[in-house]
Image (cartoon, grey):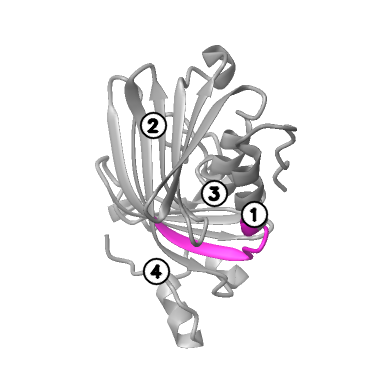
Amino acid sequence: MLVKAQAEGNDAQWIFEKIHKRYETIRDYQCRIDTFCTDGRNIEHRILNFYFKRPRLIRVDLLWGNKPFDNGSVGVLLDGETVTGHRGGILSLFIMSVPKKSPLATTLRGEAFDEIDMEAVLSRLLFYIGNGRVSIRQDGDSFWITCVPYDVNANGGISMDIARFDKNTLSITKFQRYEGTTLVQEAVWTDYIINAGLPDRLFDPEFDPRELKRDGIAVLDQKP
């Protein structure tokens, strides 16, 4: 459960409460995420299908990536601590379980499955209530929220977060993180399917999501 923003008189509070209220109506969601990150030496670029079901079942299907055995990798997070799944290619036959912070289950920057979902992004933004400056602007059908911490060290070295939300659905559509003036992380979220009725069996790494179509459940395309 997200902690609601508590900052009397803060001009940004209304948007966080609005987004939080919308998030609480979501039982499950699917989306395509095109994600980039760098640790300053290496670059990671991946395109994935992301599935979420309350209370916090998470599945990631890695459709394309720039690292060996990325393509076709699948991972699920069921208990909040362990990721079960398989790598792509010739390794797809081998199911394994690893701690969620294992390099096999995290991004190049060490982010786990439950640090890249909608709830995690909202939590990061809520950090700035009382701990940074928040500005909001509207651009067409989008809200842009720009956050700058008072203390960069208290924010893991991140000097600015920028999030874009669809003004009508309040779904996040882009999230960027900066160290100084350098963009170190970006995720673009598209193709949302919300409250489709995802069954628990989806959160088995050997289950093919395309089978849900036979039950009349809308599901993401499996092509990158």
Q: Are marks 2 and 4 in contact (CB under 8 Å)?
A: no
CA neighbours of label 4 inside 10 A, class few (<14), some (14 to 19), many (20+): some
On screen, residue 172 versus residue 47, left or right, reads right
Magenta range is 22-32
Type of the residue with mark 1: Arg
Q: Say if the magenta span includes residue 25.
A: yes
CA neighbours of label 2 inside 10 A, class few (<14), some (14 to 19), many (20+): some
Say whether residue 99 is visible.
Answer: no
Type of the residue with mark 2: Leu
The residue that mark 1 highlights is 56
Q: What is the distance, in whole Å, between disc 3 and disc 1 at their CAs?
A: 11 Å
Tell how many labels: 4
Which label belongs to residue 8?
Answer: none
Residue at the image point whose x is 39% and y is 25% from the top: 178
Q: Say if the magenta span includes residue 97.
A: no
The residue that mark 3 highlights is 118
- Residue 97 in the image: x percent, y percent? 54, 47
Which label belongs to residue 220?
Answer: 4
The residue that mark 2 highlights is 108
- Residue 146 in the image: x percent, y percent? 47, 33
